Amino acid sequence: MGFKTKQGKMRIGIIILNWNGKLHTLACIESLVASRDTLLCILIVDNGSKDGTVDALMRWGKRQKWEVHIFQETTASGFQNILPVMFGREEIYILQLDKNVGYTKGNNIGIKWFQKSGADAVLILNNDTWVTSEAIFRMEETIKKSSAIGIVGCKIMNYNDDGFQYQGGGNLSYWLGVHYLRRFKGHPKGDVKVNFVPGCAMLIRMSVLNALGGFRDDFFAYTDDIEFCHRVRQAGWTLMLNLDTFIRHKLSQATGGRRTALYYYFVTRNTLIFIIENLRGLQQLVALIMFIFARLLQMILWTSSRHWGRIKGVIMGVIDFVRGVRGPGWATRFLKL
């Protein structure tokens, strides 16, 4: 068991962020073991988990005869003593953080680690995904076609069935409040140019990260992938989806699922930040009106179903946006930071 590699492959560093999700993380790693024709290095960034994730990974490594390396590093300045990193080996690296620093900062720590490790590209991968054996190989094929391609994704399927996930990448309409995603009719194949690749499975060229940095730490979680994709496109790189392969995704397991107060808090606050800071003129005004209208309509519908938590999440997202509160903000009490 292990990666099957060959010459001429990109050195791809895989970052899997974990927060009290050992079962999801173990399943994700199991899927990666079968990846073919790839030169990979798996890095688990553990966000201060209390569920025994690290011990579970150690036991997994012992059973599968994989080496598991654990480090307590939290900043790039401390990474020199753990190099060189080996790609294409049956090894897993774990960066164990003292606390939950968020999705954005946790992934940024992993990015800095691979910037010092000689990776050619980084795959941001949610721990609640299942990677098919050819998915990374196909995405690598796409990103190697042109140095102008900065980010590559693939189709995102529901974890337990063959349905496509709405958030699986495509072309966002900023005019319609940012989150309306134009998908593809029928069953297209091959590579397609898009303006959004979801953060659950995002292959990023290292030169992009060297030039622009990673995600915005002040977003903490959600909408960070929208902002990052916009920034990459503004800098001149192209975003692509390879529709010949797919990854399965469970959706937002770290915060209890897609439709939670935490989800709506971060999406509301961060989308408002994105609209105000990145859109201009009439587009900004229309996007703001459409987003607020959509949220008001949702809250009216939620009152009939008594989803008071979602309503509070939206309201607190707006309040913290106005107050200039960034990072975990209102969610701190729930995330036990």
Image: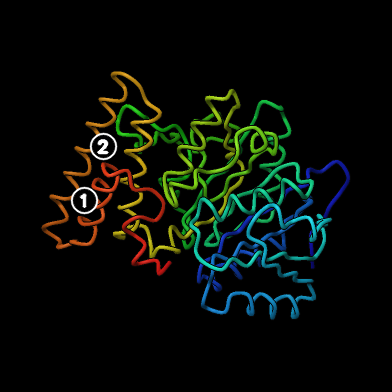
Q: Nearer the viewer, mark 2 or mark 1?
A: 1
Q: Amino acid at mark 2?
A: Phe
Are dots 2 and 1 in contact, CB under 8 Å?
no
Give me the residue at 58% from left, 54% from top: 125
Q: Amino acid at mark 1?
A: Ile
> Would you name the residue on which mark 2 appears?
291
Give 28 or 103, whichever is nearer the viewer: 103
Give me the residue at 53% from left, 72% from top: 49
Give 260 or 186, whichever is nearer the viewer: 260
**Label 2 crowd bin: few (<14), some (14–19), many (20+), radius 10 Å:** many
Q: Percent from the top left, x then y, of residue 53?
A: 58, 75
> Would you name the residue on which mark 1 appears?
315
Q: Percent from the top left, x then y, of residue 225?
A: 48, 42
In this rendering, position of residue 139 left or right of residue 102: right
In this rendering, position of residue 131 left or right of residue 49: right
Does label 2 or label 1 sit earlier along the sequence? 2
**Label 1 crowd bin: few (<14), some (14–19), many (20+), radius 10 Å:** many
Q: Is residue 277 above or below residue 225?
A: above
| CA distance for labels 2 and 1 | 13 Å
> In this view, which residue lies farthest toward the right?
7
In this rendering, position of residue 173 left or right of residue 19: left
> In this view, which residue lies farthest toward the front?
77
Choose top left, top right, bottom left or bottom right for residue 335: bottom left
Give me the residue at 78% from left, 72% from top: 66
Q: Quadrant of the N terminus?
A: bottom right
